[in-house]
Image (tube, rainbow, N blue to C red):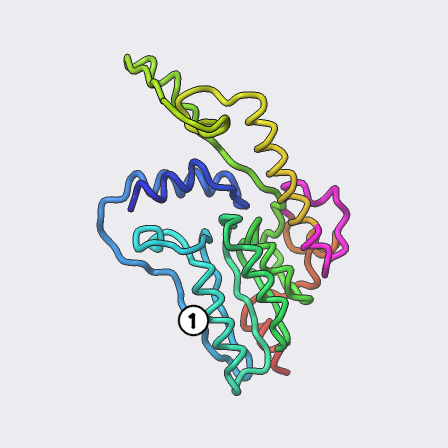
Amino acid sequence: MKHHLINKIKSDLWAIRPDYLTTLYQAALDFDGSGNASNSRGYSVEGSTAVVPIYGALGKNLNDFEALFMTDYNDIETALIEAENDESVETILLDINSPGGTIQGLPELVNYMRTIEKPLVSYTDGMMASAAYWLGTVSPHLLISQTAEVGSVGVYVALLDESKALEMQGYKVEAISAGKYKLDYSGYEPLTDEARARLQANVDKWHGRFKAAVQVNYPVDDEYLEGQTFEGEEAVKVQMASGLVDSLSDALLLINE
C-alpha cells in the first residue's frame, strides 16, 4: 500500500503546494508501520451550522495507508450530503486547513458542491491552497484570518526519470511494448519532447479550468492565479477572499447571529 501512495506522488496530476508534496513523499518513505488514520471525519453542529473539517493533503479513493496521511474526497462528500439532509442544519461551513491534493476526484466533488442548496461558507485560519482553495471558492463567502494563506492556483505533475540512476547501478532496462505512447512516462528513459508537450497541454488545461472555477465567485485577475499565495488582508484586496475573521468561533458567531 505504501508503494501505491509513492507511485501516486510520482505520477498523478496534483494541485498542491510542491513543498507539501515533498513532505508527503518523505513521510510515506519513512513510515514505520505505527499509527492509525487520524483525519477528521463527518461534521459537528454549532448552533445551526454544520462545520465540515477539510484538513491535510486531499485525494480520491484512498487506501488505509494513504488515509494515514490524507483526507479522502469521498469522506468530504459524505459529510456534505449528511449535513445537507440534516434538518437541524441551516448553513454549512467548510473549516479548511490544507495544502491541496490530487486533481483526480476534485472536479467531481466541486460539481456536487454546486448543487448544495444550503448556504456554504468557507473559512481558514491556516492554509487553503491549490485543490483546497478550489473547494473553498465554491462558497460565495470565503473568510480568512489575518495570518492564513490562500491561493497557490496551479497544477503540476512531477515525473521521476530513473534512467541515469539505473545506468549508474549497472542496470539496463529493455522494455518490449506495443502502442506508440505506451512507455512515454515509464521512467526507464528520458521524457521525449512529444510526451512532454502532451503533459504540458494537460497541465495547462487543468490550470485553465482551475482559474475559471475560482472566477465563478471571485473576480480575481489572472495575474494572481499563477501559483502565488496571499495572506489575510492581501487576499481580500485582490479578491481571493471575501472577508477577515480572526477565529472559527468568530466565523460561527457571524453566521449564527
Q: Is residue 48 above or below residue 61?
A: below
Residue appearing at x 64%, y 66% in the figure: 139
Magenta highlight on residue 147: no
Outermost residue, front direction?
178
Residue 255 x/y as whole percent: 62, 77
Specify start and end residues of the magenta stretch as a single range: 212-229
Dot 1 crowding, Cα within 10 Å, few <14, some 14–19, many 20+: some
Toward the viewer: 105 or 44?
A: 105
**Which of the image's four quarters has the C terminus?**
bottom right
Outermost residue, bottom direction?
87
Direction from residue 60 to residue 150 in the image, left or right:
right
Residue appearing at x 54%, y 55% in the figure: 106
- The residue under label 1 is 42
Residue 158 x/y as whole percent: 49, 33
Secondary element under disc 1, as helix, strand or loop, is loop
Toward the viewer: 59 or 147?
A: 59
Residue appearing at x 34%, y 18% in the figure: 174
Residue 141 x/y as whole percent: 67, 67
Q: Is residue 254 above or below residue 180?
A: below
Direction from residue 146 to residue 35 in the image, left or right:
left
Toward the viewer: 34 or 207?
A: 207
> Which corner quadrant of the image does residue 202 belong to?
top right
> Amino acid type of disc 1?
Gly
> Which corner quadrant of the image does residue 225 belong to?
top right
Residue appearing at x 45%, y 51% in the figure: 57
Q: How many marks?
A: 1
